[in-house]
Amino acid sequence: MLLRRRMDALVSAYRELGRFSGAALVARGDRVLFKKAYGCANYEHDVPNGPATVFRIGSQTKTFTAIAILRLQERGLLHVSDPVGRHLPGYPRGADITLHHLLTNTSGIPDYVTTDGFTRIMGTPRTRERLIAGFKDRPLLFEPGARMSYSNSGWVLLGEVIERLSGLGYARYLQENVFAPLGMERSGLDDGTRLVEGRADGYMSVDGTVIRTPYVDNSNQDAAGALHSTAEDLHRWQRGLPRLLRGDSLAELLGPHVDGHGYGCAMADGRIESSGGTIGYVSVSAWYPRDGLFVCVLSNIENAAFSEIERALAAIARGEPYERPERRVFVTVDPDVFDRFAGRYTMRFMGRVSTMEITRVGDRLMAEVHGLARTELRPMSETRYFARMKGEVELDFLASGQIALNWAGRDVTAERVSV
């Protein structure tokens, strides 16, 4: 009971600061220690989130795509060492790129999400054929296997492989071979043509006030990020994985293969994580094998402090120190200071290079990361700023001309490339 009260107090504090709306679940083995929802699934109509509310899970979809591939491997229909061309004849460099390269983001195929104009067309339905046509003829960023660069494109190709080998649509294959066997009754893929009971709408938080985010059609996320689920279903998934995959397949899923990453998940310090972010939503499922602990945080606020909440809930469950959130204090800075920071910066995350444009607009400092909406950088000092964009971001402008970012709990360095 004491653990439950501490967990509720923690998440409630984030909620009161406008830094969370969604559902959280903590379990040790089959025993659920904490399960509660906060905020609204629809703010316009004041519909509350509940423990069974459905959320889009973004790139957690990739872990399920990887599971589907490994299930096909267990049936002898493919091997992850197969060249892509064996299953997708005619694909450029298909003899050199393997399924393993796609599963580890080491194929060198550019990420279609970061291409110019993606945000302008993301609300328009597209077939997978058109999606693939948009990136397949672009030159590789590097030779297959040379290094890692996060690429949604590779996961779209894996979705096509799943359909061709199984003879089923991607969504139906997952339903029959993953969700149904694990009892995940409220998980699936929304194709935009049917109602999904209890699904939360997506929002952005601005100074504690929520605003609607732009619409993204799931056809533009596909096997890379189109699934939805609930905290309860994701707990069933975590508990049921050993029944779904053989031991060797489970080990292959978790890796690590490259830089601590498995297939659609990451492992570090004895912690396994599958996380995701898409327009209007962020999510994380983390399990700690030594403790038998599982923590799931799903949010329908795109810039929620989901990673901080997950880590703090785990700390409470493990009897470790944790911090309650505090209200950030913003200050007034002479806008002329902003001119020192304006320019173009590049940063690398999971090998993928992204561009960030810093501009002064009147008396405000603005940032736009390729593929995300432009947002204000709010000063906490002359050199330290805060922004909300696909999670919470704190930025320190350094004397070296670099920016040190803490983005949803991850440290990233941005290099200035032009003024």
Image (tube, helix red, strand yellow):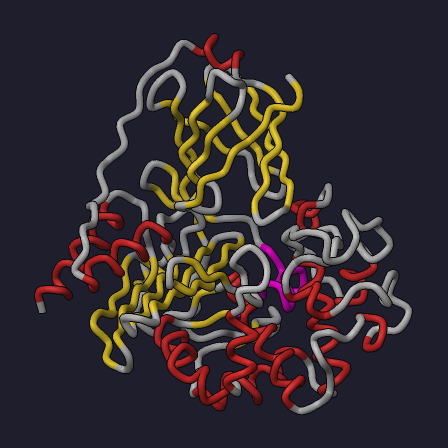
Question: For residue 401, what is the image quadrant?
Answer: top right
Rendered-image quadrant of the C terminus: top right
Q: Position of residue 215 (x, y in %)?
A: 57, 54
Residue 257: quarter of image: bottom right
Residue 323 or residue 101, whichever sits in front: 101
Percent x, y of residue 222: 65, 66
> How many callouts does the rendering have?
0
Q: Check the image and report above or below for 266 versus 366.
A: below
In the rendered image, the residue lying farthest to the left is: 2
Identify which residue, 330 or 61, lies in the foreground. Answer: 61
Q: What residue do we see at 52% from left, 33% from top?
A: 413
Residue 117 percent across, percent down from the top left:
72, 43
Going 86% across and 66% down the picture, which residue do you hit? 91
> 220 or 259: which is nearer to us?
259
Determine the image quadrant of residue 394.
top left
Residue 191 on the magenta segment: no
Left or right, residue 151 beside residue 30:
right
Toward the right, the furthest residue is: 90
- Give coordinates of residue 138: x percent, y percent: 84, 50
Q: Residue at x 44, y 27 (%)?
A: 377
Part of the protein shown in magenta: 216-227
Q: Is residue 225 magenta?
A: yes
Above or below 3: residue 114: above
Q: Residue at x 70, y 62 (%)?
A: 154
Position of the N terminus by quadrant: bottom left
Q: Is residue 219 above or below residue 336?
A: below
26 with respect to 352 (left or right): left
> 366 or 401: nearer the eye?
401
